[in-house]
Image (cartoon, helix red, strand yellow):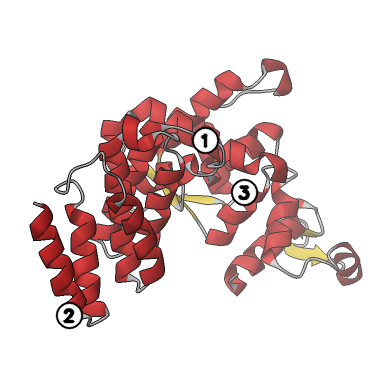
């Protein structure tokens, strides 16, 4: 967790709880070690300190921290303002004693040493430590965790529109994927395809598989009839990424699904065929099988 962060938070906690006070008459700090020891006996890690401190914040500040925690390690002021304004409209006015602007809440979080404004980037904030973000995320009730993250992703997606999501593609897609079971959404499946392609292009094949499989899970049951182009792209990309990771059985499973579809042409299956040929040739060294597959493809053209 980092000793400097723990030390800072520990001293700040002592000061906030008046276990450490500055005597202006004597011009020195005063404390009682026995009282500090009894009051902080279980405070042996920075996570506990941060949880204890954050839970003493106002309800509004806690809700703001929860929203910010969903946006990643860093985020723009424009993004958090967009999300927070939307959340404020959803919050019952009677549930908050006061309402503060996004700028005021950001300043509060900076003063509490939760966030910092990035140097030379006045429009961007970041968490001072990843453990601070984790603790802020833990403020969300466990039973609401996935649905809350999904709701933040939906706000982000709706406010920006798919064409403007490129800089935050992974973050938004991760939030939308918080709930996948029983979800059918072609738009979100298409977003997962974009994320999978972007991950593949930077050789993050494990993430590419995650996004491709998430996209597949969001397709309707009649996917090969209703959205064949999107479906074949997701399956082909999943097969390609599995092949790069050496997961040949999983690659074959995705390939079989595509190749068994009589409703799509052999040209639409080309990416799957290329993946199989590359696997047979370069990974498995089964040259005769690769030649046999190649001749089969030529015969079907």
Query: Residue 287 — which label?
Result: 2
Secondary structure, mark 2, is helix
Q: Residues within 10 Å of mark 2 (few under 14, many from 20)?
A: few
How far apart are the two marked residues, 3 and 2, measured between alpha carbons? 54 Å
How far apart are the two marked residues, 2 and 1, measured between alpha carbons? 42 Å
Q: Could you tell me residue 67's position as x and y percent?
A: 55, 38
Closest to the camera, between mark 2 and mark 1, is 2
Closest to the camera, between mark 3 and mark 1, is 1
Q: Which image quarter: residue 172? A: top left
Side (left or right) of 257 relative to 19: left
Query: Residue 183 — which label?
Result: 1
Above or below residue 53? Residue 94 is: above
Furthest-bottom residue in view?
285
The residue lying at 72 percent from left, 22 percent from top is 95
In the foreground, 66 or 190: 190
In the foreground, 146 or 12: 146
The residue lying at 47 percent from left, 39 percent from top is 176
Above or below residue 253? Residue 114 is: above
N-terminal label among 3 and 1: 3
Query: Residue 136 — which label?
Result: 3
């Amino acid at each position: 967790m980092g000793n400097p962060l723990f030390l800072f938070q520990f001293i700040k906690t002592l000061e906030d709880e008046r276990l450490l006070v500055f005597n202006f008459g004597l011009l020195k700090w005063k404390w009682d070690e026995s009282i500090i020891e009894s009051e902080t006996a279980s405070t042996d890690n920075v996570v506990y300190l941060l949880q204890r401190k954050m839970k003493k914040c106002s309800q509004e500040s806690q809700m703001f921290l929860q929203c910010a925690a969903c946006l990643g390690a860093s985020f723009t002021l424009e993004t958090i303002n967009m999300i927070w304004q939307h959340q404020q409209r959803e919050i019952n006015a009677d549930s908050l004693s006061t309402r503060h602007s996004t700028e005021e809440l950001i300043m509060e979080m900076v003063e509490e040493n939760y966030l910092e404004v990035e140097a030379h980037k006045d429009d961007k904030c970041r968490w001072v430590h990843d453990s601070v973000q984790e603790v802020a995320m833990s403020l969300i009730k466990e039973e609401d965790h996935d649905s809350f993250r999904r709701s933040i992703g939906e706000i982000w997606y709706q406010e920006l529109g798919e064409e403007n999501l490129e800089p935050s593609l992974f973050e938004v897609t991760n939030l939308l994927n918080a709930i996948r079971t029983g979800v059918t959404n072609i738009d979100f499946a298409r977003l997962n395809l974009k994320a999978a392609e972007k991950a593949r292009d930077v050789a993050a094949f494990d993430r590419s598989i995650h996004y491709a499989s998430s996209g597949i899970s969001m397709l309707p049951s009649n996917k090969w009839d209703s959205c064949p182009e999107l479906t074949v792209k997701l399956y082909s990309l999943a097969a390609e990424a599995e092949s790069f990771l050496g997961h040949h059985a999983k690659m074959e499973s995705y390939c079989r699904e595509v190749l068994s579809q009589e409703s799509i042409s052999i040209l639409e299956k080309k990416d799957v065929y290329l993946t199989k040929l590359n696997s047979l040739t370069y990974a498995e060294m089964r040259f005769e099988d690769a030649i046999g597959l190649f001749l089969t493809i030529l015969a079907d053209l």
